[in-house]
Image (cartoon, rainbow, N blue to C red):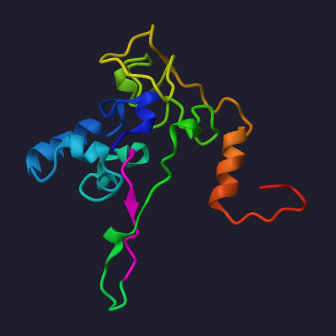
Amino acid sequence: MQVIGNKYVHFECSNLQGYDAAKALCDEKGSFTIHEVCASAILSQAEPWASTGLNAAAYSTDPLVDTHHLDSHGLPDGYKHPYTVTADPEWYDVHSIMHYPSKTSWNPDKGWSIRGVPLVRWKKGNKNFKPPKEINDGNAEIIDIWNPLTPTEKDVAIVKALYPWETTGESR
């Protein structure tokens, strides 16, 4: 599966608060690797990792499943009902009011820099961008805190697509 966001941003789980404690638990328990916990939409929200404060699930590009869905016999079958808000590369919106800034869940011990924050924007990121192997000041930048402060055109279009939208003469 292609991860669209990687063409626009770089996520570094090791720069999140709680990473060191979560990694120690992974090493101790051996059931999951820290890479699996960082990539999962679910694991860092569950114990024992939730108590470490690791907020990796918020950055996950994995689809979620409906954990409460039951089949016609009352048996759980949520794994058959994945959902996600991944988008066509044309729709990735690094300027969205919903996009995380670099500071979200940042571990201050890592330092405030391109290499110390959990999320940075590729300066030349786009749908055809091939991310470099390393980040530096020449190819990445810190994502400002909620800038701009108004919804983008894509924000508005996505809200209209996700939620029932009644119009008053306005075209969808």
**Does 62 lie within the magenta span?**
yes
Above or below: residue 73 compared with residue 36: below
Is 7 left, or right, of 40 in this rendering? right
Q: Quadrant of residue 111?
A: top left
Q: Residue at x 62, y 32 (%)?
A: 95
- Which of 6 and 50 lies nearest the eye of the viewer? 6
Q: Quadrant of residue 39?
A: top left
Count of labels shown? Answer: 0
Q: Residue at x 72, y 35 (%)?
A: 149
Q: List x then y, in percent, for residue 134.
A: 32, 16
**Does 32 lie within the magenta span?**
no
- Which of 13 and 91 lies nearest the eye of the viewer? 91
Is 90 left, or right, of 131 in this rendering? right
Residues drawn in magenta: 60-70
Quarter placement of the C terminus: bottom right
Q: List x then y, in percent, for residue 171.
A: 82, 55
Q: Residue at x 65, y 57 (%)?
A: 161
Q: List x then y, in percent, for residue 138.
A: 45, 7
The residue most toward the right is 169
The residue most toward the bottom is 73
